[in-house]
Amino acid sequence: MTVFGGEHSVSIGTIRAFNEMFDDITVLHIDAHADLRESYEGSACNHACAVYEASQTTNLIQVGIRSMDIIEKTVMDEEKTYFAHEMAVDDSWMDSAIDQMTDNVFITFDLDAFDPSIMPSTGTPEPGGLLYYETLEFLKQVFEEKNVVGFDIVELCPNKTKNLQIS
Amino acid sequence: MKTKTYAGIPEELAKLETAKIVLIPVPYDGTSTWQKGADKGPDAFLDASENMELYDIETGSEVYQQGVFLADAVTENSSPEAMVEAVHQATKNTLKRTNL
């Protein structure tokens, strides 16, 4: 089953449902941003809080992270976090991340995890992101080795470049 | 009126009862902090799906033959909390109905 957004706050509801329906679930969070704030701008359902609840209730593994507030360090489990600047120089992150997953895996994929050169159509782009084929290789490995119970794809923010005229 | 299906696949392959794949759109953009427009994401995704080939070279397969059900969009947007609860219920109800 796939839920597609929409901004990342939609995942709070999706992950809550999967966590209630499956035992011992891992949430694989692929994103440029840590999204670990407990509350932001007066709401715990802000898109900056997308996986705070998951960090408290599931086995959360974060991949591609390259933007966060220092306060999020108090929540983040760095043993289960794969930062983009480290992934760029050491490809052992794929096996390491999979080794830390339980059997049941839900994937929440924020499209800003991709490098803006290949995914400009997102609301909060960050340089230094994932490329297409390395991402596919990782996802194929996860699907082969784990029971992926569902996933979501969020933060697609269509840009208007198709309307540009080249003269 | 013809029912809208993912990628324009035939309606007999788009029924909840038989589909192995369920898609739930949530066109919500109530709390984003920089560039707005994520609420247009689901329509853009579905629009693009109608303009792609359905055969996948890498896997040598046509995944849509397993059936793809496109659920009604979750459109609750009165507050972030109400949207999250609506997505929670829609997801849970679908999981219970389909044994996916």
Image (tube, grey):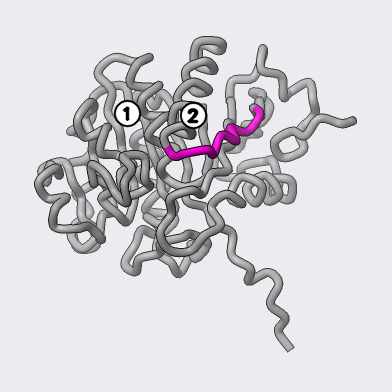
How many marks the image carries: the answer is: 2
- Tell me where residue A22 appears, x and y as whole percent: 34, 15
Q: Which residue is mark 2?
A: B87
Callout 2 environment at 10 Å: few (<14), some (14 to 19), or many (20+)? many
Q: Quadrant of the C terminus of chain A?
A: bottom right
- Report the amino acid beneath label 2: Val
**Magenta stretch: dominant SS?**
loop
Q: Quadrant of residue B26?
A: top right
Furthest residue in direction bottom, as rendered: A167
Indicate whether A87 appears above or below B78.
below
Specify start and end residues of the magenta stretch as a single range: B72-80
Q: Chain of mark 2?
A: B
Q: Is residue A98 visible?
A: no
Q: Which residue is mark 1?
A: A145
Which of the two discs, 1 and 2, sits closer to the camera?
A: 2
Q: Is residue B81 visible?
A: yes
Q: Quadrant of residue B16?
A: top right
Magenta span contains residue B35: no
In 3D space, how far apart are the residues under numbered discs 1 and 2 (Cα atoms)? 28 Å
Magenta span contains residue B78: yes
- Tell me where residue A61 appears, x and y as whole percent: 23, 39
Furthest residue in direction right, as rendered: B1
| Mark 2: secondary structure | helix
